Amino acid sequence: MKGSADQTDRISFSRRNILSGFLFGLGMIAFLDEAVFHQLLNWHHFYDKSTTNVGLISDGLFHAFSWFATIGGLFLFADLRRRHAVRLTRWWGGVLLGSGSFQLYDGIIQHKIMRIHQIRYVENVLMYDIIWNLIAIVLIIAGTIVLFTLSAKERRRD
């Protein structure tokens, strides 16, 4: 019976490590997007279909979202640490997956389908889109490889 409870805890902690890393990665990449592309380079706002003031307000809401995701991920991480259940490799796999997923969502859904903003307002935005989405795909593939490799090692060990 104890073995079953240990197995349940291990699966639960495994998922929490991935979720914590995913939220942290999502928040971190959204923060970098906001800080670099919205504020430093001033290439776009989160919502560019209205006035500059509305764009700035949307940037603030986007920044709050990234902050809450990051803090949520770190609260989960603190709980895992308190329980001595942090698995850093699994957590980093979640970070890569969260970062790539957000960036791909931003590049496909927000840039192309919803058209609420573009990476940059230039004549040929295609190169920017390709680079943006390729980086996202590389991050997702790297995170998936880390998580699958780790799972395969654990299955062999059991």
Image (cartoon, helix red, strand yellow):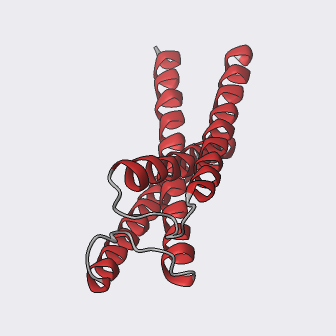
- Which quadrant of the view contains residue 97? top right
62 sits left or right of 135 in the view: left
Residue 137 image offset from top left, x and y in percent: 61, 42
Nearest the viewer among 45 and 70 is: 45
x, y (%) of residue 121? 49, 70
Residue 8 visible? The answer is yes
Identified at 51% across, 76% down, the residue is 43
Residue 67 vs residue 140: left or right? left
Q: Residue furthest front?
A: 123
Q: Is 57 left, or right, of 133 in this rendering? A: left
Q: Residue at x 38, y 54 (%)?
A: 110
Residue under the point 52% across and 53% down: 103
Identify the residue at image location x=53%, y=77%: 35
Q: Viewer-proximal residue, 42 or 98?
A: 42
User: How many callouts does the rendering have?
Assistant: 0
Q: Does residue 147 sit above or below 103 in this rendering?
A: above
Residue 50 drawn above or below residue 101:
below
Residue 16, position as x, y percentages in the image: 48, 41
